[in-house]
Image (spheres, rainbow, N blue to C red):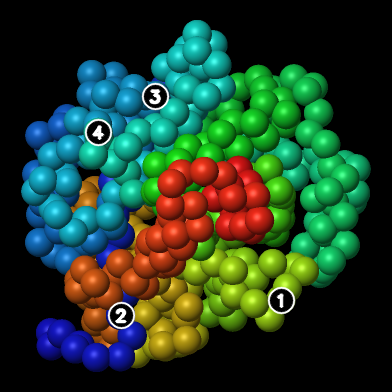
Amino acid sequence: MEVATGGKSLILGCASTGAKFTPGNHRATGNALLDQISSGTTIKNSQLALIAEAEALYGMGCRYYHYHARNPHTHEQSTSNDIYQQISRPLQRRCKEMLLSFGASRNGPEVRESIQRFGEWERISQSSLPLHLGGAHFVTVQAAVELQLMCEAERQYGDLDLDLIDSESFCKIVAEYRPSDRLTTTSLETYSTSNGADYGRTSPLIQFEVYRSAVKARQRLGLFHEVEWVQFPRSYAMTRYAVEHPKIRLGGSGQLNITLLFGFSPRLPYPKSYGEFKKVVDAARKLEYDLAAPGIKKRHVTITVGAAVLPEQAGQHITRLDVGALSGHPACALRRLATYAAQPDSGVDVLRFGMEDTPYAVDVQGNLRLADNADLAEIVINEITMNGARVETDHDVIFDRMGLNWVRQNLFFEERQRPLGQPNLSSDISLQTV
C-alpha cells in the first residue's frame, strides 16, 4: 500500500498496559478466549518485554507511549514508582523522540493497600517524578475518581450540561463550590471488568487537594499537563473547573493534552457517527479559552482519542462508516476511530491504540482473536493511510503541535520577569498562582 506523504498527519500513540484488565479485576466467565483477554494475561509486564515492544513500535512510527505500572509478578496494578522508572529510563535512551505518558486512574488490591498505608497521594505520586529521574512528559492527573467532585457539584447545582459549562454561570460554580470532606466509597458508572470501577473510600476534598498537588508538581518540574475524559459532559465540567479554579490552574503553563476514551462509560459512549465524535472533540478544543475571555487563546489544547471497548461489547460496535475511503462499509470500533481521526477536519492530534483500550482484534463478523500492541498498530496505520493521512514522526513538528513550545515560551517569559528569582506579584503568569 502506498504511504500518504501530505495532508492530515496523526501522532501515533500506544496505551501499552492499562489498569483495567488484570487477574484481580476479572471474574471468570467460562469463555476461554474472553477470560484470557479480560484477565490481562496477554499484556506484557516484564521490563525486557515492554522495552523490546516499545522499540518495535517506535520503529513503526509510534511517538507517544502511555503506560500504567503493573506488578511483573502478579500482573496487578501497582503504585510503585520504581516500576515506572524502570520503563522510563531505558525508553528515554533507546527511543529518544518518544513522548512518555504515565496513567493515574488506578485501582485494584495492591493500589488500595498502598493508599491505606501512605494516603491518596500514592495513586498519583508518579506525577512528581522529574523526567531525568524516570518520570514522564505527561501524567493523566484527572483520574476517573476525581470526577466525584462534579458528582457532588451536580447534587448542589443540578445537571452540568454543555450550555451551563460553556456559560459564565459556570464561573459562579467554580467560585462557590467547596468540596466536602465526607468520606464515601467511590464507584464509577463505567463499562469495566468486575472490579475495575471500584476506587475505594475517599472524599471530594481529598481528591481536590490531590489534583491541585499533582498540577503544582507538574508546574514545578516544567513538565506537561494531561487529562483523560471518561464521562461526557461531566469530564468536560471537571476540566473546565480545574482550568478556571485559581488554586489549580490546569494548563496554566500554556498547554493541555486531553485524551477522549470513547466507549469507557455510558456517559461517553462509543460514537455512532462522525458527527457524534466531532461533538466531543470540539467541546474539548474550547478549553483553549477561558470563559471570561472567549476571544483570547490562553493555552494550546491537543486531542488524543482512544477506543475503550470491552471484548464482549466488540460486536455491538461494528457499524457502517459514514465518512472516509470505506464509507458504507462495516468497521469495528478501532478501525472507525482511526478513520474518524484521519479526516482532515477531525481536530485530532494523537491516535491512541493499545492493550489498555482494546486488547484484542475483531473482524467484521464480530469474531475476536488475540492481538498485541504491534498488531493493533498495523490496523490503525492501514486505516489512516487508506484515508489519505500519514503518521507524523518529525520531532520538531510533534513538539510544536503538542503545545510544548508554549510551555517553553512561558517559562522563558517567567524567568525574564524575575531574573534573580524574586517573586513578581504583578505578573499574572499562572505558574505563580498554583
Q: Earlier in the sequence, mark 1 or mark 3?
A: 3
- What is the quadrant of the N terminus in the image? bottom left
Residue 27, image quadrant: top left
- Residue shown at the point (72%, 31%) measured from the top left: 204
Residue position marked by numbered label 1 in the rendering: 294
- Tell me which numbered mark, 1 or 4, is placed earlier along the sequence: 4
Q: Classify mark 2: residues with Cα within 10 Å, few (<14), some (14-19) or many (20+).
A: many
Residue 53 x %, y %: 13, 47
Most distant residue in the front direction: 420
Q: Position of residue 284 (x, y in %)?
A: 59, 67
- The reply to whether dot 3 and dot 4 touch (C-beta < 8 Å) is no
> Amino acid type of disc 3?
Thr
Find residue 56 and report its horizontal and vertical position in percent: 10, 54
Q: Nearer the viewer, residue 72 or 300?
A: 300
Q: Are marks 3 and 2 in contact (CB under 8 Å)?
A: no
Task: From the image, tell me which residue sits under label 3.
Answer: 79
**Which of pointers 4 and 2 lies earlier in the amino acid sequence?**
2
